[in-house]
Image (cartoon, rainbow, N blue to C red):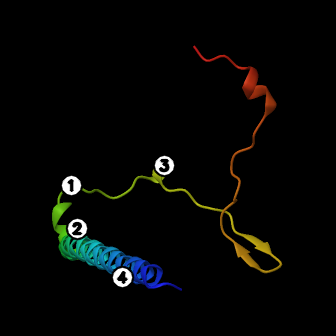
Amino acid sequence: MSSSTSRHFFVFTTVCVICISAFSALGLIWLRQQISRTADRTNVVERQLVELDRRIGILNEQIAAATQPGIIQARVAGRLRPSRDFQVVFMQERVREDGFEYAVRDPFETSVDLAFLQFE
């Protein structure tokens, strides 16, 4: 190899190394920026989750307080009356092989004739 060829090769190699280093540095900066943005978004979502958990806790406390038997009884005091005879329904008990069945699972029968009825 001649000295000018080796000099061109050295300059070319140096320029390539500098370019690769510069692009790598820019790539690392871009990656760090993306990581930072993702971390910021994650922090926002985590704060929203904490706030939602806090609100759910408050709602659960309110539901628990509102459904206490004493509170329900106080709310309906004086407005309830004993049931009448026609309002009481007795279910027939059926015995099955694996135990008792207290209510019929399919109380209503379907009929094809219902499809032909016209309600006005």
CA gap, disc 4 to disc 3? 101 Å
Residue 79, numbered circle: 1
CA gap, disc 3 to disc 1? 20 Å
Residue 51, numbered circle: none
Residue type at mark 4 is Thr
- Residue 9 % position (x, y): 45, 80
Classed neighbour count for the residue bearing mark 3: other residues with Cα under 10 Å, few (<14), some (14–19), many (≥20): few
- Residue 62 % position (x, y): 18, 71
Residue type at mark 2 is Ile
Q: Which residue is mark 2?
A: 72
- Quarter of the view holding residue 35: bottom left
73 w.r.t. 116: above or below: below
- Residue 88 % position (x, y): 49, 56
Classed neighbour count for the residue bearing mark 2: other residues with Cα under 10 Å, few (<14), some (14–19), many (≥20): few
Residue type at mark 3 is Phe
18 w.r.t. 84: above or below: below
Q: Which residue is mark 3?
A: 86
> Of marks 2 and 3, which one's residue comes earlier in the chain?
2
Whether residue 68 can be seen here: no
